[in-house]
Image (tube, rainbow, N blue to C red):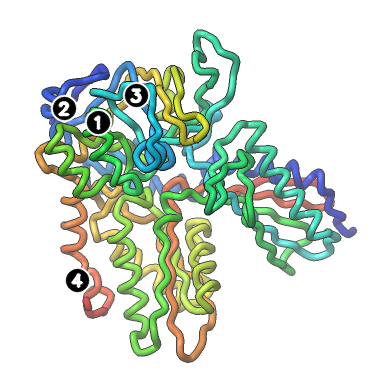
Amino acid sequence: MSLHVDPAAVEQIASTLYIRALKMLPPDIKQGFATLAVRETNTTAQSVLGVMVRNIAVAEATDNLLCQDTGIPIYRVTIGRDVVVDGVTLTEAIRRGCAHATRAHPLRSSVVHPLTRRNEHTSCGIGVPVIEFNYSAAFDGLRIEMIPKGSGSENMSWLKMAIPAEGADAIKRFVIDCVLDAGGKTCPPTIIGVGIGGTADLCVHLSKLAATRPLGTACSDPDGAALEVQLLAVVNELGVGPQGLGGDATAFAVHVELAATHITMNPVAVNMQCHSARRASAVLTADGVAFGY
Amino acid sequence: MTAHVLTMPITEAQVRELRCNDTVTLEHTLYGIRDATQIAMFDRGRKTRFDLHGHAVIHTAPNVRRTDFGVATPAGYAPVCVGTTTSARMERFTQPLMAQHGVRLIIGKGGLGQGSLQAFGALGGAYLAIIGGTAALETTWIEAIEDVDLDDLNPESLWKFRIRGFGPLLVAMDSYGGSLYDAVDRAARGRRDAALARLGVKPS
């Protein structure tokens, strides 16, 4: 039976997802904290991680946002098989849902015009929320993932158009230098997203996909997956630590996403996700809506 | 390492007692300030009716709910979620904030730079680190939004919070040139070449 997507349902889902993402940290991130806390040898860092874990519990107990930064809202729509949907209507419904959540909760609108700095207090503006469309043959229905991307980590984003003669060494050196430059500004421990290859814009996009991938997942390319393991071990020996106050727990993970690139190019991008690595998702099928992370 | 409890506002002598790695819990009053607030104050000549002398400011733009005016909501706002943003963007405002407005303490995350460190030494101030991203917890330390100024900049207004048991916060930069961020940064950069060697990469 084909799924005919109801715009009113999508609007409601887009609103719910924004608030849900801001309040409930995914289980893989909670597990990430537990893993880092066990390994941490620095007493200040142990205390910092303890406060972060306590905050997760307080947010749940008080039904409050984990972090004040409502971020730039990103919605990733994956259209599966046998779905009947009007893309324009769907996009409008997501924008309305995002604005509704902002007004109704209420949430701080963190979105302004880039030149006038005017805030419409809807979390919406030109091109924001960011709405991406993907397609999948893996399921029937429609999946929407919502990510409020905080600015502390987003302000620390980098692209280097390295050249083939610099090889993979340039990629590794670049990642280490980005972690050092970021210090505590990205709210570590972070997920370090590394985009490799593609065009300049695709490379940056890949770094964002990598930074927002669930913990415990690996790059689908075996060489990319090997690089993830290699880089994480070294990053967590730099001593930046949680909040840049020193310690072992600089990153939960290094995630790599790859695309083929040009014979003359060797691009690398880094985007980080802060410790409040928030995301929420909903799958819409003919049977109804199921919320997850 | 000393645990201080400071009822705001404080004197220069009190701030000079603070040393890196001490902890501080604040009581009574705290002001919230942000990028747009300080751009308005220091680049566009906007004046505030608040007297910030001896006070602490926190780098924040809170989530708030508009309400009727009442005992618990004297400014017509209730706090929803009050957290802290990355301080580094506001580095150039530390000196004028202290010199022109007498601010003694800056609360933020991620640390401030050399200009701020010099201002803390010359004028008597300190930076208190809060754990970024822990706003739900931080909000439980806020009793009320007592007043608000420059509210056309909302959410980057100048907020006056009534606080209780705000902390413990970590003294991360003091008036004696101490900065935990500098120490960590120096040590981490000192490990760079060894890290690259482990990856089989030359340092250059």
Q: Residues within 10 Å of mark 4 (few under 14, many from 20)?
A: some
Label 1, label 2: how many angstroms apart (C-alpha)? 8 Å
Toward which corner of the image does residue B25 lie, by quadrant? Answer: top left
Camera-nearest residue between A131 and B184:
A131
Which mark, residue A74? none
Asked if the residue at tag 3 contacts the one at tag 4, i.e. Cβ–Cβ closer than 8 Å, the answer is: no
Asked if the residue at tag 1 contacts the one at tag 4, i.e. Cβ–Cβ closer than 8 Å, the answer is: no
Q: Are marks 4 and 3 on the same chain?
A: yes
Which one is closest to the eye, mark 4 or mark 3?
Answer: 3
Q: Are marks 1 and 2 on the same chain?
A: yes
Label 4, label 3: how many angstroms apart (C-alpha)? 43 Å
The chain that hosts pointer 1 is B
Asked if the residue at tag 2 contacts the one at tag 1, i.e. Cβ–Cβ closer than 8 Å, the answer is: yes
Residue at 62% of width from left, 53% of height from top? A128
Q: Earlier in the sequence, mark 4 or mark 3?
A: 3
Q: x, y percentage for residue A30?
A: 46, 45
Q: Secondary structure at mark 2?
A: helix
Q: x, y percentage for residue B181?
A: 22, 48
The correct choice, above or below, for B68 with respect to B106 in the image is above
Label 4, label 1: how many angstroms apart (C-alpha)? 37 Å
